Image (spheres, rainbow, N blue to C red):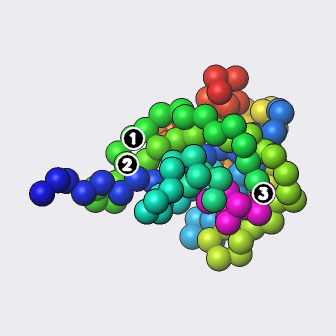
């Protein structure tokens, strides 16, 4: 028996000096994060990134670029982080998981403590993606 591994992808959608984040209905008000989901059988990691973004935010992406990975708190899971470039579409939350989408610019992200918006904890892959992008390390 080989150990089971359930890969999940998390991605930051970027468009020039803006990034698209979503508010998951299970999170506190005005908490915004990256989009994420499990990889389905028979699809590549890049296909999973594109599918999840389209399902959750209603936009299409291109140029999927690997960032980093980390263990995920569910048993046997691995979170793989990506950047994805906005291609087309008008952001529209799926209203099942994501109930709000919003474009943020770098200045807003870097000065978020002065606003009503919140981001995931610093040790999360989502925050690492957002911070890397805000600092131009994407």
In the rendering, which numbered label is found on residue 45? none
Circle 2 Cα neighbour tier, 10 Å, few/some/many (<14 / 14–19 / ≥20): some
Circle 1 Cα neighbour tier, 10 Å, few/some/many (<14 / 14–19 / ≥20): few
Q: CA distance from mark 1 to mark 3?
A: 26 Å
Tell me: residue 77, above or below residue 27: above
Contact (CB < 8 A) between labels 2 and 1?
A: yes
Q: Secondary structure at mark 1?
A: strand
Q: CA distance from mark 2 to mark 1?
A: 6 Å
Residue position marked by numbered label 1 in the rendering = 70
Q: Secondary structure at mark 3?
A: loop
Tell me: residue 137, above or below residue 3: above
Left-right relation of 90 to 48: right
Between 135 and 5, the one nearer to me in the picture: 5
- Is residue 48 in the magenta section? no
Residue position marked by numbered label 2 in the rendering = 78
Q: CA distance from mark 3 to mark 2?
A: 25 Å
- Residue 8 in which image quadrant: bottom left
Mark nearer the N terminus (3 vs 2): 3
Residue 32 seen by the camera: no
Residue 105 seen by the camera: yes
Residue position marked by numbered label 3 in the rendering = 59
Mark nearer the N terminus (2 vs 1): 1
Front position among marks 1 and 3: 3
- Residue 19 in which image quadrant: top right
Between 136 and 113, the one nearer to me in the picture: 136
Q: Position of residue 83 (x, y in %)?
A: 64, 38
Of all residues, the one furthest to the left in this rendering is 1
- Which image quarter is the N terminus in? bottom left
- Which image quarter is the C terminus in? top right
The stretch in magenta equals 52-59
């Amino acid at each position: 028996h080989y150990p089971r591994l359930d890969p999940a992808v998390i991605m930051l959608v970027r468009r020039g000096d803006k990034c698209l984040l979503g508010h998951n209905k299970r999170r506190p008000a005005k908490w915004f994060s990256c989009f994420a989901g499990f990889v389905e059988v028979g699809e590549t990691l890049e296909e999973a990134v594109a599918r999840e973004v389209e399902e959750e935010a209603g936009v299409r992406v291109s140029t999927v670029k690997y960032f980093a990975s980390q263990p995920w708190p569910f048993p046997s899971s691995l979170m793989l982080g990506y950047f994805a470039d906005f291609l087309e579409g008008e952001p529209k939350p799926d209203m099942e998981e994501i109930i709000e989408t919003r474009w943020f610019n770098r200045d807003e992200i870097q000065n978020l403590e002065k606003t009503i918006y919140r981001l995931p904890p610093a040790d999360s892959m989502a925050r690492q993606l957002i911070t890397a992008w805000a600092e131009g390390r994407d």
